[in-house]
C-alpha cells in the first residue's frame, strides 16, 4: 500500500512524496521526487489521482500532471514519463528522518505542453464535469480575476502528437471568453 502527496512550491518545483508501507509494520519507505519548473508553482493537479476518487473513475482520462504558476501559464506533464523516471532514479530509505539529499531526486523534463492561461498568476486548477454532457473540463483561476476552462478531450487532441517529446512549449487559447479590459474599449 502506498500513500502519495503532491505539493506545489515557491522554489520552482513540484514535489511528489510516496510513502510505501511494507509488510512489516515497523518499516516504511519514503521516496521524494522534485519536478523542476521555470517559475514558482502555485497549484498542482494529478488527473489520475483526481479521477480515481470520483464517481467518474471509469472515464478515460489522460495520465497528466498539470501545474499552474506565477508566469501565467499552465504546464502539462506526462505522468507516465515522470513515474518511469521516478522508478529509474528513486532511492528507498527508512522513514527515520533521512537526510534530504539522500531521498530527494530531481526531474527537469517531462512537460510537453503549455497553455497561455491568464494575465496574472494561475492560483487554482480543478476538474469540472458538465452535468449535461458529462464531459470533463480543466478549470483554472488566476489573480487576474478570471476563470478559464478547457475541455479535456480537446486538450488531448491538441497535445497528443507531443506526448513523449519533452520540454516543447505549445500555446493554446482558452475555450472561454477572456475578461475585457475596460480601458481598451
Image: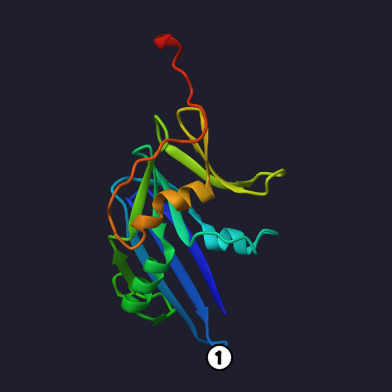
SS under mark 1 = loop
Q: Nearer the viewer, residue 76 or 96?
A: 76
**Which is nearer the eye, 44 or 131?**
131
Mark 1: give few (<14), some (14-19) or many (20+) Cα within 10 Å.
few
User: Based on the displayed image, in which of its 4 quarters is residue 26 positioned?
Assistant: bottom right
Which residue is rendered at x = 57% and y = 87% of the image? 25
Residue 98 drawn at (x, y percent): 37, 76
Left or right: 31 in relation to 147? left
As drawn, 112 above or below 118 = below
At x 33%, y 69%, the residue is: 104
Rendered view: 82 above or below 179 = below
Q: Which residue is located at x 66 percent, y 44 percent?
A: 130
Q: In this view, does 21 lie to the left or right of 14?
A: right
Quarter placement of the C terminus: top left
> For this rendering, which residue is in front, 103 or 140?
140
Horizontally, residue 130 falls left or right of residue 112, namely right
Amino acid at each position: 500500500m502506498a500513500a502519495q502527496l503532491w505539493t506545489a512550491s515557491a522554489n520552482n518545483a513540484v514535489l511528489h512524496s510516496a510513502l510505501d508501507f511494507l509488510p512489516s509494520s515497523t518499516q516504511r519507505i519514503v521516496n521524494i521526487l522534485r519536478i523542476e519548473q521555470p517559475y514558482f508553482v502555485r497549484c498542482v493537479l494529478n488527473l489520475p489521482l483526481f479521477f480515481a476518487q470520483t464517481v467518474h473513475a471509469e472515464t478515460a482520462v489522460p495520465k497528466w500532471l498539470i501545474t499552474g504558476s506565477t508566469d501565467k501559464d499552465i504546464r502539462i506533464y506526462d505522468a507516465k514519463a515522470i513515474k518511469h523516471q521516478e522508478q529509474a532514479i528513486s532511492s528507498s530509505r527508512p522513514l527515520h528522518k533521512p537526510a534530504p539529499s539522500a531521498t530527494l531526486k530531481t526531474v527537469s523534463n517531462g512537460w510537453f505542453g503549455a497553455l497561455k492561461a491568464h494575465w496574472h498568476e494561475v492560483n487554482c486548477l480543478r476538474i469540472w464535469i458538465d452535468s449535461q454532457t458529462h464531459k470533463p473540463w480543466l478549470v483554472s483561476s488566476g489573480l487576474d480575476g478570471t476563470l478559464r476552462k478547457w475541455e479535456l478531450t480537446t486538450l488531448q487532441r491538441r497535445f497528443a502528437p507531443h506526448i513523449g517529446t519533452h520540454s516543447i512549449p505549445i500555446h493554446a487559447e482558452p475555450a472561454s471568453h477572456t475578461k475585457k479590459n475596460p480601458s481598451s474599449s
